[in-house]
Amino acid sequence: MKINDSIKNAGLNVEKPSATKLGSANNKNAQASQVDAKSAESVTLSPMSAQLKSLEEKVAASNVFDAEKVEAIKSAIANGQFKVDSEKVADGLIASVKDFLSTQK
């Protein structure tokens, strides 16, 4: 069943806004925003916001991954020398599941 059909069948009168109604609503919102912007003369940020900004800049500047290690893995795969340690993968999966289950409680 479609949503539109269920609205019609329920006897609800759903009016779609016309372009003129939307335009006048947007104009009112824009005017209200301009009034709010004019009335707000200053903003004071907490020390926590300065710390967050500093952390954000540090994260943006740091590398998320080790580029040299990625290149070494790429070349090992290309040369057919990359081997997967199935025990290590299995241990990692089990640890992840244990962690997930402990956070669900």
Image (spheres, rainbow, N blue to C red):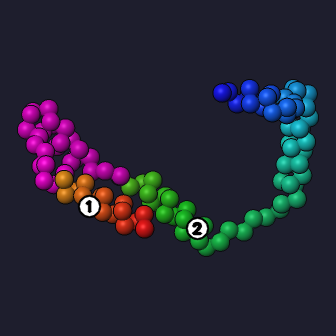
Residue at image x 79%, y 64%?
Answer: 42
The disc, 1 or 2, on the residue closer to the chain's N-terminal end is: 2
Q: Quadrant of the C terminus?
A: bottom left
User: What is the distance, in whole Å, between disc 1 and disc 2 at their CAs?
Assistant: 36 Å
> Which amino acid, by three-letter code, is at mark 2?
Ala
Q: Which residue is mark 2?
A: 50
Residues shaded magenta = 63-89
Q: Secondary structure at mark 1?
A: helix
Q: Main secondary structure of the magenta part?
A: helix
Using residue 64 as the reference point, say whether residue 76 is left or right of it.
Answer: left
Instruction: Report the residue that reaches farthest toward the left.
Output: 81
**x, y percent for residue 28:** 91, 42
> Which amino acid, by three-letter code, is at mark 1?
Ala
In this rendering, the answer to whether 65 lies above or below 78 is below
Q: Which residue is mark 1?
A: 95
Residue at image x 89%, y 48%?
Answer: 32
